């Protein structure tokens, strides 16, 4: 019985492969027109849906489904989960969130001493991550390099924003302000005293370019403690900072 079935399948295959092309009006697996049509359809699909695009859509859908399941079942939702589809680009301050175990290193694209102009590798890596939210934390190193002048800093910032928006047109962008610095930290480098002017310039840029400004000054109080340099706060600043960023992205998602 089995050999008869195989023979029947073989006959059908021969018919479609070799005989049907010569029958008027019949469908041909070897039809040049059909092959070209299929090739164009496949090419169009590949162009519209690159592997990265498909992967990003799957990751987004997975995040949204898991979030809904957690909410419906009363399961805990921590900040790392909320930040899963977000990227943070910056300097040593951003690295601190990883050092304190508050964010996964996969979401943070930062290095000590980074300025905007020296962060191309981090910016490119963040873009390749295809985040839905991009937080940008720069300023202290730029303050020193530009000797307190906000104009070139803002020019660098807007160039970076243009690059990110061209690559990620649907991403929400956030600009993180410089937190207050201690007096003894600024006394060693006087240009740091101009951090308030940098913050004001960033606020104006956000209003002009439709960005979200994240004001970290509200996280510092008289009881806040700093590292010996007077520039880098200690915990609980980093936990509060992450809470603030998550609050911003949740607000943005609710508005979308």
Image: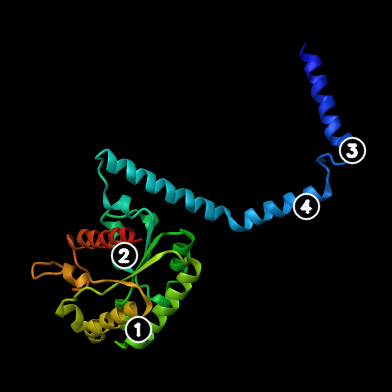
Residue with the mark numbered 3:
23
Q: Where residue 60 sits: x, y (%)?
A: 43, 51
- Answer few, some or many: residues within 10 Å of disc 3's Cα (few below 14, many 20 plus, some between 14 and 19): few
Residue with the mark numbered 4:
36
- Answer few, some or many: residues within 10 Å of disc 1's Cα (few below 14, many 20 plus, some between 14 and 19): few
Q: Earlier in the sequence, mark 3 or mark 2?
A: 3
164 lies left or right of 252: right
What numbered label is drawn on residue 145?
A: 1
Q: Looking at the image, is 112 positioned above or below residue 200? A: above
Q: Are marks 3 and 2 in contact (CB under 8 Å)?
A: no
Q: Are marks 4 and 2 in contact (CB under 8 Å)?
A: no
Q: Where residue 32 sits: x, y (%)?
A: 83, 49
Q: Of tags 4 and 2, which is closer to the observer?
A: 4
Q: Looking at the image, is 164 positioned above or below residue 45? A: below
What numbered label is drawn on residue 72?
A: none
SS at circle 3? loop
Question: Toward the viewer: 165 or 18?
Answer: 18
Q: Where residue 104 sits: x, y (%)?
A: 34, 53
What numbered label is drawn on residue 94?
A: 2
Q: Earlier in the sequence, mark 3 or mark 4?
A: 3
């Amino acid at each position: 019985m089995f050999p008869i079935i195989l023979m029947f399948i073989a006959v059908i295959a021969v018919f479609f492969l070799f005989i049907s092309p010569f029958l008027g009006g019949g469908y041909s697996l070897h039809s040049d027109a059909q092959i070209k049509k299929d090739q164009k359809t496949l090419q169009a699909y590949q162009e519209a849906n690159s592997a990265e695009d498909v992967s990003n859509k799957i990751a987004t859908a997975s995040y949204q489904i898991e979030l809904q399941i957690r909410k419906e079942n009363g399961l805990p939702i921590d900040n790392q989960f909320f930040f899963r589809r977000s990227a943070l680009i910056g300097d040593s301050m951003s690295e601190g969130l990883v050092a304190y175990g508050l964010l996964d290193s996969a979401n943070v694209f930062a290095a000590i001493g980074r300025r905007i102009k020296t962060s191309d590798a981090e910016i490119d890596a963040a873009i390749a991550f295809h985040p839905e939210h991009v937080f940008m934390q720069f300023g202290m190193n730029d303050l020193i390099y530009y000797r307190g002048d906000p104009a070139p800093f803002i020019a660098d910032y807007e160039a970076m924003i243009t690059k990110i928006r061209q690559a990620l047109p649907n991403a929400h962008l956030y600009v993180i302000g410089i937190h207050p610095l201690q007096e003894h930290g600024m006394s060693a480098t006087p240009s740091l005293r101009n951090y308030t002017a940098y913050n004001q310039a960033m606020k104006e840029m956000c209003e002009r370019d439709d960005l979200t400004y994240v004001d970290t000054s509200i996280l510092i109080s008289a009881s806040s403690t700093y590292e010996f340099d007077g520039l880098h706060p200690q915990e609980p600043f980093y936990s509060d900072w992450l809470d603030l960023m998550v609050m911003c992205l949740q607000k943005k998602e609710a508005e979308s």
